[in-house]
Amino acid sequence: MLSVPQIPSMPPEWQLRGFPGIATGTSVPGFGPLRARRDSKKLRIANFVGLSGPSGIWGPASINSTLLGVSEINRCGGILGREIEVAFYDTGGDINDVTRTASDIVASEDADLIMGSHISAVRVALRKVVAGHIPYLYTPVYEGGERTPGVMAIGETPGTQWRPSIEWLANTRHASNWYLIGSDYVWPWLSHRAIKKYIKDAGGRVVGEEFVPIGEHNHSTQLARIRAARPDVVLMTLIGADSVAFNRAFAEQGLGSRMLRLAGAMDETVLLGIGADNTENLFCASGYFIDMASRANDAFRSQYEASFGRHAPPLGSIAQSNYEGLRFLETVAARAGSLARKPLLSAAANVDYQGARGTIGIRRGSASMPIYLAEANGLDFRLVKQF
């Protein structure tokens, strides 16, 4: 069960069918489907997000960011005149259960579009049952190369996210020896392939690499190998709460002062879990940070705080991507003049849209955006470089 923060005085569109408690701040008693009668005047979105497991750390803020986007768009008349209606489905459990749920949604026509900010392993499974039937919008950072018909991906990819940060650390911090550690699934696997090339191109070498089972919180063996390898940088593709556990243990063993850390799926939510005392020499490369200075981000943060309060779950890259996914969809639908699958997907392949990160360009299905390298400063990130 997920406790949703208090939402003050929300407009009627926040009353989501299947989630009667979400407008009053009570616990959501389940992540129910968009059932009952089909209403062609509504645009029904099934949002698959991590609400449990290692990625559940991003769940509350992901729900909030989605609801903020829904509210803003609905107040302006919806998408092509259709008010958005959204339901949330947890991707933190067994992947087979998640795919069965998605398959049921497709078969029963219970949604017009699938959206997701889950791990790539879930995306690979979902696209087998979703692609070709209804549009599928995937919003977070991922490994790139998504060309499945029907799937739209808008997140950072290795070429833009990792390469410039590796070069900067090599040139500025004289980093040459790298140790790669990631969660054992598709995003780290494929990202590491590209990362190894970027390290070689920067004049460095990989002195160790391993993948850790998702949900593993005992990292004593990995940390012993890292200590023995004595890298300049530990590059991490660990996910959510698993990253929290690793970085806490890393610092507690006194490694934080001896080597740098560079992460790619880390945000302020994860940093909060790691703790201010455990973030020495910790860097992150991302297309979004809370303290980015821009009018677009200032407006997004202001609306988020006004809607959910000063003590709402902190925004971060993964959560923000849900808001941005809706803004992307709004732009693409307007350009296509339709929410039908083929014209929508055609328009999505090459488009510019506005989100909390500013202007993002999609070219041949791949997103292009500014990437920021930030260094942890207690429980905040200090932006070091924009690429």
Image: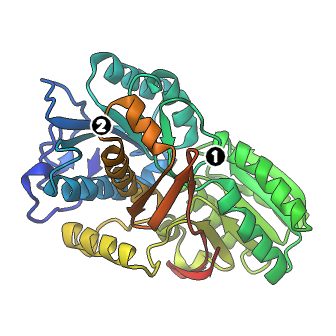
Residue at image position (65%, 62%) is 161
Residue highlighted by disc 1: 144
Which quarter of the image is occupied by the N terminus?
top left
Q: Position of residue 143 (x, y in %)?
A: 64, 47
Residue at 22 percent across and 72 percent down: it is 309
In the displayed structure, would residue 228 be above or below residue 238?
below
- Image coordinates for residue 10, horizontal then vertical, percent: 11, 60
Residue 163 lies in quadrant: bottom right
In the displayed structure image, the side of residue 341 where residue 224 appears, left or right: right
Classify 332 as above or below 203: above
Q: Nearer the viewer, residue 195 or 219?
A: 195
Q: Nearer the viewer, residue 296 or 253?
A: 296
Q: Earlier in the sequence, mark 2 or mark 1?
A: 1
Q: Is residue 224 visible?
A: no
Query: In front: 372, or 360?
Result: 360
Which x, y percent locates residue 228? Answer: 89, 63
Provide residue 342's location: percent of width, then percent of height: 41, 30
Say whether residue 5 is left or right of residue 180.
left
Mark 1 closeness class: few <14, some 14–19, many ≥20 residues within 10 Å: some
Left or right: 237 as drawn, with respect to 118: right
SS label for mark 2: loop
Crowding at dot 2, Cα within 10 Å, few <14 / some 14-19 / many 20+, comes out as some
Determine whether 45 is above or below 360 in the image: above
Say the numbered circle drawn on residue 338: 2
Q: From the viewer's perspective, is residue 182 above or below residue 296?
A: above
Residue drawn at point x = 57 percent, y = 69 percent:
370
- Report the amino acid beneath label 1: Gly
Labels 2, 1: front one: 2
